Image: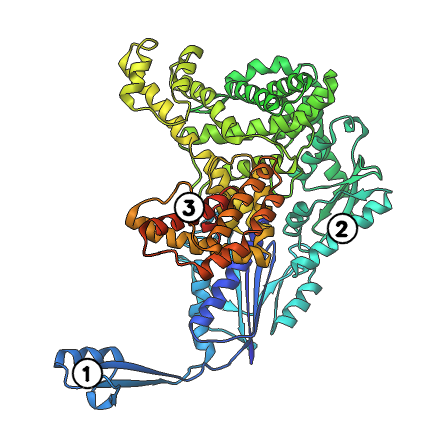
């Protein structure tokens, strides 16, 4: 068995592209090997700033012989059919084909045997195709070449079993012949050298100051940074993303420590770390109590004769210039109150169809108040939620956020504290963006929760209202993330809020912004009139809406525009709650909750209280995990199936059961058990004791089993049959108090 070594050596690859490119290259080569019938035992890929290296091990030196059988036409078929068969099978005469009786007649069969060729003969085409198909986010041309690549490509190692694979990559101007030479570190070990195998390649690269393995570079950087921090009496601030990026910037990592001038230490730590991380790729250090330390770690790509002193001095000088800008903006921004910045939001467009950021802030403020009141929070909390919402976007006009957009919200919090605003307000300004993802912290303070919910619900209703909904491949406004954020805020804080009512109540504000965005200010009276009419959030017929608009807007063209705006908002908003349900199912499925149980609860309709919905799902899950629950589920499905068949013949069998028509003990027992279960379960469900209600349902197992065992539903007497069908309908109706059992699988 042999090994295949490929190295693509080039100018520096952007760090963010390296890992994906390496994996794509491995996938392309291994897929093409498999397609060619060439097996292998393992494949591993490496990346550094200047190279992609692939090792495929355990390849045969020759491809296996292949024997194929091709079925042809029936013996005696027309000449045209025989000629087509011979051509496709590569035969010159029909005598070269075998005749076989298949049991359905005698057919011609061609047996094609191909001798396996040398593996090395198939490799040039595979390598060339893989290189050309390798996808890059951005590509370039260089020199007179037509070839597109991420950066100028210098050389290609292509070795099979120690021998150079004959081949050349045509660049459409010049070409690169496959070879066995590469280069080491650009500065520490310049010059080319030859390699004979992967082990030789990795060993010589290390001697040439290149750590080939990315994970090893990460380990060296992390260990060196931690040691450097410890030597200064500090601890390294954990930053996996930065570690990943820096590992893609260096081939020979050398960890150095620099100092931050004390004059900058009064600037918020987040601003300093953002500047260091984003612009300079420096690691921040912290004191034992978690405060930013006046030191940073920089990872150089080489050793120097002075031990890195010049490198450190240069980086400190660059950082000083960066932080001077940050401090200037910080000092200037503190001179203007957040409240005084609110009018400036009128000059910032949120979206062309939704108006300005000032209008968005007005909507968030109104919605924050509505949410706080719906949750019966005290007046002080309501007032603080309104203030936090009004100031939530003010820091977007600060110089600091203009320079460092990553600190929006955080900057507002610092300014709020500087102004002496309540802590709840300051924290809400920072936290109203949260949670930003599945691993992000969920706010728990009431003011923060109200504003965070309002910000995300406004985003969803607004963009659905202008028909900017996510598709399978696109979600440019991160609406899925917003929906999951709302779900987490509600569920993890145990908030009893009816989301459907909140969405419906927010529609008029979205319509007002959308109307203003198309040049027609929607007055409050008109807004209330329109949305009072469509209280169920269904679009009105155009002519009906025109009639209602007439007293307020006489111009027919304006009426047409507003009709379109209103109805788009209503149609879009009607899709928001189902979108939440979809996101909830995705979220719960990842936690192992069965999607059919969620569907069973949602099928009853009207459940937009997520806390109560999840309690129902949990109780239902507990019931069907028991033997009684499994048997009851089977019986419920049996009852539903019988009803479905019979109701197709003679319509619904709803209504009360006639006790006088109950002739068998088993049907009498079932009727009594259903009344008892309903009587027990209904108040428990009203009290949201869903587990208790499920226990009441579980008691139905025995009488239901007995009924199906002893009673013939389709009795010959029509009244008895109808009565028994109504009894089955009562089973369905009783269980539907908590879920639609027909939606449950199994």
Q: Which residue is mark 3?
A: 660
396 sits to left or right of 232: left
Residue at 35% of width from left, 48% of height from top? 722
**In whole angstroms, how far apart are the C-alphas of marks 1 and 3?**
73 Å
Circle 2 crowding by C-alpha within 10 Å: few under 14, some 14–19, many from 20: few
Q: Position of residue 478 (x, y in %)?
A: 51, 37
Find numbered disc 1 in the image and state the secondary structure of the residue it sits on: strand
Q: Nearer the viewer, residue 432 or 277?
A: 432
Circle 3 crowding by C-alpha within 10 Å: few under 14, some 14–19, many from 20: few
486 sits to left or right of 221: left
Asked if residue 745 shows in the view, the reply is: no
Which mark is in front, 2 or 3?
Answer: 3
**In whole angstroms, how far apart are the C-alphas of marks 2 and 1?**
80 Å
Quarter of the image that includes the N terminus: bottom right
Q: Position of residue 285 (x, y in %)?
A: 78, 40
Mark 2 vs mark 1: which is more N-terminal? 1
Q: Position of residue 637 (x, y in %)?
A: 45, 54
Q: Nearer the viewer, residue 78 or 644?
A: 644
């Amino acid at each position: 068995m042999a090994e295949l070594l490929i190295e693509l050596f080039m100018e520096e690859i952007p760090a963010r592209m390296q890992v994906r490119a390496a994996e794509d290259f491995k996938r392309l080569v291994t897929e093409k090997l498999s397609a060619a019938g060439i097996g292998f035992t393992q494949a591993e890929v490496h990346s550094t700033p200047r190279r992609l290296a692939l090792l495929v091990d355990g390849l045969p030196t020759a491809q296996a012989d292949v024997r194929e059988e091709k079925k042809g036409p029936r013996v005696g078929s027309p000449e045209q059919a025989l000629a087509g068969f011979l051509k496709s099978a590569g035969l010159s005469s029909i005598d070269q084909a075998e005749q076989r009786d298949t049991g359905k007649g005698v057919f011609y069969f061609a047996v094609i045997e191909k001798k396996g060729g040398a593996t090395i003969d198939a490799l040039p085409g595979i390598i060339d195709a893989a290189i050309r198909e390798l996808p890059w986010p951005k590509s370039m041309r260089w020199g007179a070449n037509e070839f597109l690549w991420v950066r100028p490509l210098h050389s290609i190692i292509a070795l099979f079993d120690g021998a150079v694979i004959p081949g050349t990559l045509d660049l459409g101007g010049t070409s690169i012949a496959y070879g066995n030479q590469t280069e080491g570190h650009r500065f520490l070990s310049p010059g080319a050298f030859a390699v004979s195998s992967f082990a030789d390649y990795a060993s010589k690269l290390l001697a040439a100051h290149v750590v080939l393995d990315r994970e090893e570079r990460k380990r060296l950087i992390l260990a060196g940074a931690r040691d450097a921090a410890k030597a200064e009496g500090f601890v390294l601030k954990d930053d996996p993303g930065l570690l990943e990026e820096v590992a893609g910037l260096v081939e020979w990592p050398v960890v150095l420590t620099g100092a931050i001038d004390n004059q900058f230490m009064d600037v918020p730590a987040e601003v300093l770390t953002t500047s260091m991380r984003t612009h300079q790729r420096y690691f921040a250090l912290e004191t034992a109590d978690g405060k930013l330390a006046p030191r940073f770690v920089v990872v150089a790509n080489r050793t120097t004769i002075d031990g890195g002193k010049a490198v450190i001095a240069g980086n400190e000088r660059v950082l000083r210039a960066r932080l001077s800008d940050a401090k200037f903006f910080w000092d200037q921004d503190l001179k203007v109150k957040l409240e005084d910045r609110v009018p400036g939001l009128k000059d910032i467009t949120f979206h062309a169809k939704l108006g300005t950021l000032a209008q968005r802030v007005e909507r968030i403020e109104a919605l924050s108040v509505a949410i706080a009141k719906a949750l019966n929070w005290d007046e002080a909390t309501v007032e603080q939620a309104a203030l936090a919402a009004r100031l939530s976007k003010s820091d977007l006009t600060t110089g600091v956020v203009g320079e460092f957009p990553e600190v929006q919200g955080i900057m507002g919090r610092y300014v709020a504290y500087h102004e002496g605003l309540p802590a709840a307000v300051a924290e809400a300004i920072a936290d109203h963006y949260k949670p930003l993802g599945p691993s992000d912290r969920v706010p728990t303070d009431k003011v923060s929760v109200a504003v965070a919910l309002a910000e995300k619900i406004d985003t969803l209703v607004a963009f659905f209202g202008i028909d900017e909904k996510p598709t399978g491949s696109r979600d440019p406004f991160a609406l899925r993330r917003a929906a999951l954020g709302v779900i987490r805020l509600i569920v993890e804080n145990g908030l009893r809020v009816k989301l459907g009512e909140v969405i419906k109540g927010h529609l008029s504000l979205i319509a007002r912004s959308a109307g203003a965005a198309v040049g027609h200010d929607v007055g409050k009276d008109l807004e209330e009139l329109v949305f009072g009419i469509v209280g169920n959030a269904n679009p009105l017929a155009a002519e009906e809406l025109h009639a209602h608009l007439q007293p307020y807007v006489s111009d027919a063209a304006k009426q047409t525009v507003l009709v379109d705006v209103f109805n788009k908002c209503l149609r879009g908003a009607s899709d928001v709650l189902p979108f939440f349900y979809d996101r909830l199912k995705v979220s719960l499925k990842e936690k192992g909750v069965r999607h059919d149980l969620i569907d069973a609860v949602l099928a009853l309709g009207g459940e937009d209280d997520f806390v109560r919905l999840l309690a129902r799902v949990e109780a239902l899950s507990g019931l069907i995990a028991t033997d009684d629950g499994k048997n009851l589920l089977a019986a419920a499905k049996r009852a539903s199936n019988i009803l479905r068949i019979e109701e197709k013949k003679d319509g619904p069998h709803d209504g009360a059961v006639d006790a006088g028509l109950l002739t068998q003990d088993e049907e009498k027992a079932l009727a009594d058990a259903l009344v008892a279960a309903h009587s027990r379960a209904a108040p428990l469900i009203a009290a949201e004791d869903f587990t208790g209600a499920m226990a009441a349902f579980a008691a139905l197992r025995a009488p239901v089993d007995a009924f199906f065992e002893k009673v013939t539903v389709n009795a010959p007497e029509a009244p008895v049959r109808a009565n028994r069908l109504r009894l089955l309908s009562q089973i369905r109706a009783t269980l539907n108090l908590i879920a639609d059992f027909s939606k449950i699988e199994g």
